[in-house]
Amino acid sequence: MKEITNKLQEIAARLFNEGKIDVFLAWEKGEHDFQTKSYAARSVDDVKNIIFNEYSIYNVSNSLLKFRDGQERIGIAVKGCDSRGIVRLLEDLQITRDRLYIVGIPCPGLKDPLAAARSFGGLGKKQEPEGLAQKCLECIQPNPVIYDELIGSEQTPRQQGDRFAAVREIEAMTPDERYKFWEDTLSTCIRCYACRQVCVACDCRTCIFDEMKPQWVGRETNTTDNMMYHLVKHAHMAGRCIECGECERVCPVGIPLMLFNRKLIKDVGELFGGPEAGMQYVEGAKPTLSVYRENDPDEFI
């Protein structure tokens, strides 16, 4: 990955020197390798801090929301999931394509820095495995879907078997069994909103869950409020989730949030068809449930 780091630094320096960008978004190393975090280089002098290592897992496209109201020209390094996030933001008119210079990195699969941190700190009951992060093992698109420049060779998707196997297991339960499963699962939610903060598709300027007048959802961590939070949030993801898995990865209590998202991905695909969220960029296009057609299925009404 040193070669990718060198190439990223070379490209970023060139873009700054040519006056094509005002900021370059990528990753920087922390005190430990697993403390890699997102980084914004604002001059050619900052370029030396840019890295790409086995823990560069954060979805950098989320950082673009901090720049949506400005005029900065932005260089950005993206993996496959990050690039789907950019498509998501372009479709939601959160940023314009002409402000971006996208450097694509076919992703070889990365490690989970949170798992490494737990092992390093001794918080886990046992040393956690050093293999790829779970979300990388389930990745269907490791290659950038939109870019101006590409570093490295295309990678093969790592998802094996039935992608919706866990969803089908839930679907096979009786209504009472499903309710009990989700009641028990969501009872552990502490409403920290980490899943919302890390989600690139959660790009509303004012979130419904922050509204106080009216207060749409209670703030208590009880069964009713927890269920309402997750049902509303994931309903907003229908046809929009880019399946980056960051919500589930950062959840401090290990809620299987991608079960919600994959159920919606499966149903939207079966009902409406078409490409999945963020898999291709067509100027002016909108996510499946952001448009209306007279022949849309309506059996559920």
Image (tube, rainbow, N blue to C red):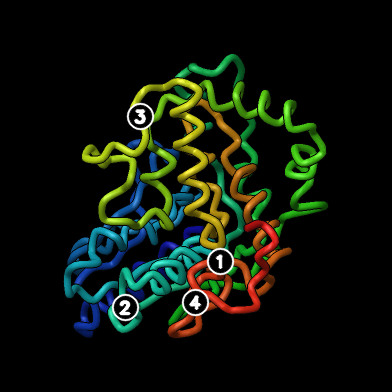
Of the numbered discs 4 and 1, the one sitting upstream in the chain is 4
Q: Which residue is mark 4?
A: 146
Cα distance between the residues tagged 4 and 1 = 13 Å
Identify the residue shown where x is 57% and y is 78%: 293
Disc 2 or disc 4, which is closer to the eye? 2
Q: Check residue 277 in the rendering and tell me which mark sits there, or answer none.
A: 1
Relative image position of residue 115 (x, y in whole percent) = 53, 32
Identify the residue shown where x is 63% and y is 64%: 141
Q: Which residue is mark 3?
A: 218
Could you tell me which secondary element the residue under label 2 belongs to? loop
On screen, residue 294 versus residue 170, left or right, reads left
Q: As rendered, which of 272 and 35 lies closer to the eye?
A: 272
Circle 1: residue type: Ala
- Quick one: label 2, few (<14), some, or many (20+) residues within 10 Å? few
Relative image position of residue 172 (x, y in whole percent) = 82, 38
Circle 4: residue type: Ile
Of the numbered discs 2 and 3, the one sitting upstream in the chain is 2
Of the numbered discs 2 and 4, the one sitting upstream in the chain is 2
Relative image position of residue 197 (x, y in whole percent) = 36, 45
State which quarter of the image contains the C terminus: bottom right
Could you tell me which secondary element the residue under label 4 belongs to? loop
Relative image position of residue 204 (x, y in whole percent) = 32, 56
Could you tell me which secondary element the residue under label 1 belongs to? loop
Cα distance between the residues tagged 2 and 4 = 13 Å
Q: Is residue 111 above or below residue 221?
A: below
